[in-house]
Image (cartoon, helix red, strand yellow):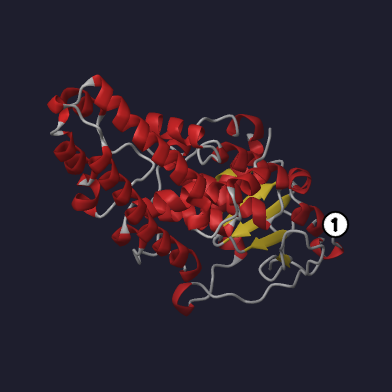
Amino acid sequence: MEVCSLEDQQISSGSAERSLKRPRVDEGQEGEPEVPTEECMRHPSLYLEDGNVILRCGDTLFRFYIGLLSRKSEVFHDMFGLAQLQPNDSEKTVDGFPVVRLHDSAEDFAHLLSALLDYESFFLQKYIPYPRFAALLRLSRKYEMEGVRKLLIHHVQKHYPTEMTGYELVMDEHGTAAEAAFTISPHPNEVLKLFWECEIMQCLPVAFYEATSRGMNSLTSRKSKVALTRQILTPALKALVAFNGSHLQHIRATVLTLRACAVCKRANLMTVEHGLAPTKADLSIFPLRDPFPKQEVSRILCEGCAEELKESYCNFRYSFWDELPGLFGLPTWRELSKYVILK
Protein backbone atom coordinates (compact mmCIF):
# COMPACT_ATOMS: atom_id res chain seq x y z
CA MET A 1 0.00 0.00 0.00
CA GLU A 2 1.43 3.37 -0.98
CA VAL A 3 1.59 5.89 1.81
CA CYS A 4 1.51 9.01 -0.34
CA SER A 5 0.57 9.97 -3.88
CA LEU A 6 1.57 13.00 -5.93
CA GLU A 7 -0.86 12.42 -8.79
CA ASP A 8 -3.36 14.97 -7.60
CA GLN A 9 -0.79 17.40 -6.28
CA GLN A 10 -1.34 20.85 -7.66
CA ILE A 11 2.06 22.09 -8.76
CA SER A 12 2.56 25.50 -10.27
CA SER A 13 5.39 28.01 -10.23
CA GLY A 14 4.86 30.81 -7.74
CA SER A 15 2.06 28.99 -5.94
CA ALA A 16 2.41 28.03 -2.31
CA GLU A 17 -0.75 25.95 -2.31
CA ARG A 18 -0.16 22.24 -2.69
CA SER A 19 -2.54 19.42 -1.89
CA LEU A 20 -1.57 15.80 -1.35
CA LYS A 21 -4.23 13.13 -1.55
CA ARG A 22 -4.26 9.51 -0.52
CA PRO A 23 -3.72 7.14 -3.42
CA ARG A 24 -6.56 5.71 -5.38
CA VAL A 25 -6.66 2.25 -6.88
CA ASP A 26 -5.10 2.57 -10.32
CA GLU A 27 -5.37 0.25 -13.25
CA GLY A 28 -2.73 -0.75 -15.69
CA GLN A 29 -3.06 -0.68 -19.45
CA GLU A 30 -6.32 -1.87 -20.97
CA GLY A 31 -8.09 -1.91 -17.61
CA GLU A 32 -5.86 -4.52 -15.98
CA PRO A 33 -5.11 -4.05 -12.26
CA GLU A 34 -1.64 -2.63 -11.75
CA VAL A 35 1.18 -4.62 -10.22
CA PRO A 36 1.15 -4.56 -6.39
CA THR A 37 3.98 -2.50 -4.93
CA GLU A 38 5.68 -5.51 -3.37
CA GLU A 39 5.93 -7.12 -6.82
CA CYS A 40 7.38 -4.07 -8.59
CA MET A 41 10.86 -4.16 -10.11
CA ARG A 42 13.61 -2.43 -8.19
CA HIS A 43 15.63 -0.13 -10.41
CA PRO A 44 19.01 -1.81 -11.05
CA SER A 45 21.17 1.25 -10.28
CA LEU A 46 18.88 3.67 -8.43
CA TYR A 47 17.58 1.46 -5.64
CA LEU A 48 20.23 2.63 -3.18
CA GLU A 49 20.97 0.53 -0.12
CA ASP A 50 21.35 3.54 2.14
CA GLY A 51 18.32 5.41 0.74
CA ASN A 52 15.54 6.32 3.17
CA VAL A 53 12.45 6.67 0.98
CA ILE A 54 10.87 4.49 -1.70
CA LEU A 55 9.61 6.20 -4.86
CA ARG A 56 7.34 4.35 -7.26
CA CYS A 57 6.97 5.25 -10.94
CA GLY A 58 4.79 2.81 -12.82
CA ASP A 59 6.04 -0.67 -11.97
CA THR A 60 9.52 0.51 -10.96
CA LEU A 61 10.76 1.27 -7.45
CA PHE A 62 13.54 3.69 -6.61
CA ARG A 63 15.19 3.99 -3.22
CA PHE A 64 16.66 7.41 -2.71
CA TYR A 65 17.60 10.12 -0.23
CA ILE A 66 14.98 12.35 1.36
CA GLY A 67 17.62 14.96 2.19
CA LEU A 68 18.92 15.30 -1.36
CA LEU A 69 15.44 15.52 -2.87
CA SER A 70 14.39 18.06 -0.24
CA ARG A 71 17.41 20.29 -0.89
CA LYS A 72 16.84 20.39 -4.64
CA SER A 73 13.03 20.51 -4.77
CA GLU A 74 10.55 22.78 -3.02
CA VAL A 75 7.81 20.23 -3.69
CA PHE A 76 9.65 17.33 -2.10
CA HIS A 77 10.82 19.57 0.75
CA ASP A 78 7.22 20.35 1.65
CA MET A 79 5.96 16.84 1.06
CA PHE A 80 8.55 15.10 3.20
CA GLY A 81 7.64 17.39 6.08
CA LEU A 82 4.06 16.12 6.17
CA ALA A 83 3.09 13.77 8.97
CA GLN A 84 1.08 11.60 6.58
CA LEU A 85 4.31 10.40 4.96
CA GLN A 86 5.14 8.39 8.09
CA PRO A 87 3.74 4.85 7.95
CA ASN A 88 1.88 3.30 10.85
CA ASP A 89 1.83 -0.32 11.96
CA SER A 90 -1.16 -1.20 9.78
CA GLU A 91 0.41 0.04 6.55
CA LYS A 92 2.69 -2.00 4.32
CA THR A 93 6.09 -0.60 3.48
CA VAL A 94 9.04 -1.69 1.37
CA ASP A 95 12.18 -2.50 3.33
CA GLY A 96 10.63 -0.62 6.23
CA PHE A 97 10.33 2.67 4.33
CA PRO A 98 7.23 4.57 3.14
CA VAL A 99 6.35 4.44 -0.54
CA VAL A 100 5.71 7.67 -2.45
CA ARG A 101 3.72 7.16 -5.63
CA LEU A 102 4.81 9.44 -8.49
CA HIS A 103 2.93 9.61 -11.77
CA ASP A 104 5.97 10.10 -13.97
CA SER A 105 7.56 7.60 -16.32
CA ALA A 106 10.26 5.48 -14.71
CA GLU A 107 12.66 6.36 -17.52
CA ASP A 108 12.21 10.11 -17.04
CA PHE A 109 12.49 9.91 -13.26
CA ALA A 110 15.64 7.79 -13.55
CA HIS A 111 17.19 10.59 -15.61
CA LEU A 112 16.40 13.03 -12.81
CA LEU A 113 17.78 10.91 -9.98
CA SER A 114 20.94 10.11 -11.95
CA ALA A 115 21.55 13.81 -12.53
CA LEU A 116 21.05 14.59 -8.82
CA LEU A 117 23.56 11.91 -7.81
CA ASP A 118 26.21 13.18 -10.22
CA TYR A 119 25.15 16.81 -10.11
CA GLU A 120 28.36 18.73 -10.86
CA SER A 121 29.83 16.53 -13.58
CA PHE A 122 26.45 16.02 -15.27
CA PHE A 123 25.99 19.72 -15.96
CA LEU A 124 29.56 20.11 -17.19
CA GLN A 125 28.78 17.98 -20.25
CA LYS A 126 29.14 19.77 -23.56
CA TYR A 127 26.26 17.81 -25.05
CA ILE A 128 23.23 16.23 -23.40
CA PRO A 129 21.06 13.56 -25.06
CA TYR A 130 17.77 15.21 -25.94
CA PRO A 131 15.50 12.64 -24.20
CA ARG A 132 17.39 13.20 -20.96
CA PHE A 133 17.35 16.98 -21.34
CA ALA A 134 13.60 17.03 -22.02
CA ALA A 135 12.84 14.80 -19.03
CA LEU A 136 14.96 16.92 -16.70
CA LEU A 137 13.50 20.20 -17.92
CA ARG A 138 9.91 19.04 -17.47
CA LEU A 139 10.49 17.41 -14.08
CA SER A 140 12.59 20.28 -12.72
CA ARG A 141 9.69 22.59 -13.54
CA LYS A 142 7.09 20.24 -12.09
CA TYR A 143 8.95 19.66 -8.83
CA GLU A 144 10.24 23.25 -8.55
CA MET A 145 13.93 22.41 -8.78
CA GLU A 146 15.04 25.92 -9.67
CA GLY A 147 18.76 25.17 -9.54
CA VAL A 148 18.44 22.26 -11.96
CA ARG A 149 16.16 24.24 -14.26
CA LYS A 150 18.58 27.18 -14.46
CA LEU A 151 21.52 24.94 -15.34
CA LEU A 152 19.51 23.27 -18.10
CA ILE A 153 18.41 26.59 -19.56
CA HIS A 154 21.94 27.97 -19.36
CA HIS A 155 23.15 24.96 -21.33
CA VAL A 156 20.64 25.35 -24.13
CA GLN A 157 20.35 29.14 -24.46
CA LYS A 158 23.86 29.51 -25.91
CA HIS A 159 22.76 27.33 -28.82
CA TYR A 160 19.43 29.17 -29.19
CA PRO A 161 20.85 32.70 -28.76
CA THR A 162 19.29 36.13 -28.84
CA GLU A 163 22.14 37.54 -30.96
CA MET A 164 22.59 36.95 -34.69
CA THR A 165 26.36 36.63 -34.31
CA GLY A 166 25.84 33.78 -31.86
CA TYR A 167 23.48 31.97 -34.19
CA GLU A 168 25.88 32.40 -37.11
CA LEU A 169 28.49 30.48 -35.11
CA VAL A 170 25.95 27.75 -34.40
CA MET A 171 25.07 27.44 -38.10
CA ASP A 172 28.72 27.49 -39.20
CA GLU A 173 29.83 24.82 -36.73
CA HIS A 174 26.78 22.59 -36.42
CA GLY A 175 24.11 23.51 -38.96
CA THR A 176 21.27 23.82 -36.45
CA ALA A 177 20.85 24.67 -32.79
CA ALA A 178 19.46 21.21 -32.04
CA GLU A 179 22.58 19.57 -33.47
CA ALA A 180 24.73 21.92 -31.41
CA ALA A 181 22.94 21.32 -28.10
CA PHE A 182 22.16 17.61 -28.07
CA THR A 183 23.94 14.35 -28.83
CA ILE A 184 20.70 12.85 -30.10
CA SER A 185 19.31 15.52 -32.41
CA PRO A 186 15.51 15.76 -32.11
CA HIS A 187 12.94 16.87 -34.64
CA PRO A 188 12.70 20.69 -34.42
CA ASN A 189 8.99 20.45 -33.61
CA GLU A 190 9.84 18.49 -30.44
CA VAL A 191 12.19 21.21 -29.25
CA LEU A 192 9.67 23.94 -30.03
CA LYS A 193 6.95 22.12 -28.07
CA LEU A 194 9.28 21.64 -25.11
CA PHE A 195 10.42 25.27 -24.96
CA TRP A 196 6.84 26.48 -25.32
CA GLU A 197 5.58 24.14 -22.60
CA CYS A 198 8.41 25.05 -20.21
CA GLU A 199 8.35 28.77 -21.08
CA ILE A 200 11.97 29.10 -22.22
CA MET A 201 11.17 32.46 -23.75
CA GLN A 202 14.65 33.52 -24.85
CA CYS A 203 15.05 30.34 -26.92
CA LEU A 204 11.66 30.39 -28.64
CA PRO A 205 12.51 32.53 -31.71
CA VAL A 206 15.28 30.21 -32.90
CA ALA A 207 13.22 27.14 -32.01
CA PHE A 208 10.30 28.54 -34.03
CA TYR A 209 12.63 29.44 -36.89
CA GLU A 210 14.21 25.98 -37.13
CA ALA A 211 10.83 24.24 -37.03
CA THR A 212 9.29 26.59 -39.59
CA SER A 213 12.28 26.45 -41.92
CA ARG A 214 11.71 22.75 -42.48
CA GLY A 215 8.64 23.60 -44.52
CA MET A 216 4.93 22.84 -44.51
CA ASN A 217 5.04 19.04 -44.43
CA SER A 218 7.37 18.94 -41.45
CA LEU A 219 5.59 21.72 -39.62
CA THR A 220 2.16 20.13 -39.92
CA SER A 221 3.23 16.54 -39.21
CA ARG A 222 0.67 14.69 -37.07
CA LYS A 223 3.09 12.13 -35.63
CA SER A 224 2.53 12.08 -31.89
CA LYS A 225 5.92 13.36 -30.77
CA VAL A 226 6.15 16.19 -33.28
CA ALA A 227 2.51 17.27 -33.72
CA LEU A 228 2.16 20.92 -32.76
CA THR A 229 -0.80 22.39 -30.93
CA ARG A 230 -2.93 24.98 -32.70
CA GLN A 231 -1.51 27.65 -30.39
CA ILE A 232 2.00 26.96 -31.69
CA LEU A 233 1.14 26.00 -35.26
CA THR A 234 -0.89 29.10 -36.14
CA PRO A 235 1.94 31.67 -35.76
CA ALA A 236 4.39 29.23 -37.33
CA LEU A 237 2.28 28.87 -40.49
CA LYS A 238 1.88 32.64 -40.76
CA ALA A 239 5.63 33.04 -40.41
CA LEU A 240 6.26 30.43 -43.10
CA VAL A 241 4.46 32.66 -45.60
CA ALA A 242 6.60 35.59 -44.48
CA PHE A 243 9.76 33.47 -44.77
CA ASN A 244 9.07 32.64 -48.38
CA GLY A 245 7.92 36.12 -49.30
CA SER A 246 10.83 38.06 -47.81
CA HIS A 247 13.46 35.54 -48.87
CA LEU A 248 12.39 35.24 -52.48
CA GLN A 249 11.78 38.97 -52.76
CA HIS A 250 15.33 39.67 -51.66
CA ILE A 251 16.85 37.11 -54.01
CA ARG A 252 14.93 38.52 -56.96
CA ALA A 253 15.93 42.06 -56.00
CA THR A 254 19.55 40.96 -55.83
CA VAL A 255 19.31 39.46 -59.30
CA LEU A 256 17.91 42.68 -60.73
CA THR A 257 20.23 45.12 -58.97
CA LEU A 258 23.57 43.27 -58.92
CA ARG A 259 25.97 45.54 -60.77
CA ALA A 260 27.65 42.63 -62.50
CA CYS A 261 30.60 43.32 -64.74
CA ALA A 262 30.53 42.06 -68.30
CA VAL A 263 32.26 38.82 -67.35
CA CYS A 264 29.77 38.20 -64.52
CA LYS A 265 26.53 38.78 -66.41
CA ARG A 266 25.71 35.10 -66.01
CA ALA A 267 25.60 35.75 -62.25
CA ASN A 268 21.89 36.39 -62.59
CA LEU A 269 21.26 32.82 -63.75
CA MET A 270 23.51 31.40 -61.03
CA THR A 271 21.78 33.46 -58.36
CA VAL A 272 18.34 32.21 -59.30
CA GLU A 273 19.51 28.61 -59.68
CA HIS A 274 21.17 28.39 -56.27
CA GLY A 275 19.06 30.88 -54.36
CA LEU A 276 15.78 29.18 -55.15
CA ALA A 277 17.03 25.59 -55.05
CA PRO A 278 15.94 24.86 -51.44
CA THR A 279 12.39 26.01 -52.17
CA LYS A 280 12.10 23.93 -55.32
CA ALA A 281 13.63 20.82 -53.78
CA ASP A 282 11.74 20.25 -50.54
CA LEU A 283 9.59 23.29 -49.81
CA SER A 284 12.04 24.24 -47.04
CA ILE A 285 13.57 27.67 -46.84
CA PHE A 286 16.25 29.07 -44.54
CA PRO A 287 16.42 32.88 -44.75
CA LEU A 288 19.25 33.08 -42.20
CA ARG A 289 21.53 30.80 -44.18
CA ASP A 290 23.59 32.06 -47.09
CA PRO A 291 21.96 30.36 -50.11
CA PHE A 292 24.92 31.03 -52.37
CA PRO A 293 27.69 28.39 -52.08
CA LYS A 294 31.00 30.14 -51.48
CA GLN A 295 33.01 27.97 -53.87
CA GLU A 296 30.39 28.33 -56.58
CA VAL A 297 30.25 32.10 -56.19
CA SER A 298 34.05 32.40 -56.32
CA ARG A 299 34.16 30.24 -59.43
CA ILE A 300 31.52 32.17 -61.35
CA LEU A 301 31.91 35.75 -60.11
CA CYS A 302 34.84 38.09 -60.00
CA GLU A 303 35.97 39.29 -56.57
CA GLY A 304 34.09 42.59 -56.77
CA CYS A 305 30.77 41.04 -57.79
CA ALA A 306 31.14 38.28 -55.18
CA GLU A 307 31.66 40.87 -52.44
CA GLU A 308 28.62 42.83 -53.59
CA LEU A 309 26.47 39.71 -53.51
CA LYS A 310 27.78 38.75 -50.07
CA GLU A 311 27.17 42.22 -48.61
CA SER A 312 23.66 42.41 -50.02
CA TYR A 313 22.57 39.10 -48.53
CA CYS A 314 24.32 39.78 -45.22
CA ASN A 315 22.30 42.96 -44.80
CA PHE A 316 19.11 41.05 -45.54
CA ARG A 317 19.90 38.32 -42.99
CA TYR A 318 20.52 40.79 -40.18
CA SER A 319 17.36 42.70 -41.03
CA PHE A 320 15.40 39.44 -41.05
CA TRP A 321 16.89 38.47 -37.68
CA ASP A 322 15.74 41.73 -36.12
CA GLU A 323 12.18 40.99 -37.20
CA LEU A 324 12.24 37.27 -36.34
CA PRO A 325 10.51 37.30 -32.90
CA GLY A 326 7.68 39.46 -34.21
CA LEU A 327 6.94 36.97 -36.99
CA PHE A 328 5.85 34.52 -34.28
CA GLY A 329 4.06 37.04 -32.08
CA LEU A 330 6.89 37.06 -29.52
CA PRO A 331 8.41 40.04 -27.66
CA THR A 332 11.36 41.90 -29.16
CA TRP A 333 14.92 40.61 -28.84
CA ARG A 334 15.56 43.31 -26.28
CA GLU A 335 12.73 42.05 -24.09
CA LEU A 336 13.67 38.41 -24.60
CA SER A 337 17.29 39.06 -23.61
CA LYS A 338 16.05 39.84 -20.09
CA TYR A 339 15.25 36.14 -19.68
CA VAL A 340 18.82 35.08 -20.42
CA ILE A 341 20.36 33.32 -17.42
CA LEU A 342 23.85 34.50 -16.54
CA LYS A 343 26.01 31.87 -14.89
The residue wearing badge 1 is 81
Q: In which quarter of the image is residue 289?
A: top left
Residue nearest the observer in this picture, 57 or 33:
57
Q: Can residue 42 be seen in this view?
A: no
Q: Is residue 77 shown above or below 59?
A: above
Residue 313 lies, in percent from the top left, at 35, 37
Please tell me in which quadrant of the rendered image residue 184 appears: top left
How many numbered marks does the figure carry?
Answer: 1
Instruction: Left or right? Give the position of 18 relative to 204.
Output: right
- In the rendered structure, the answer to whether residue 336 lies left or right of residue 289 reads right
Q: Where is residue 104 in the image (x, y as percent from the top left)?
A: 58, 60
Observer-nearest residue: 59 or 164? 164
Residue at image position (60%, 55%) is 198
- The spot of residue 94 in percent (x, y) is 68, 57
Kind of residue at badge 1? Gly
Residue 273, picture quadrant: top left
Q: Assign the C terminus to one quadrant of the image.
A: top right
Question: Going 62% across and 48% down the picture, which residue do you hit?
Answer: 336
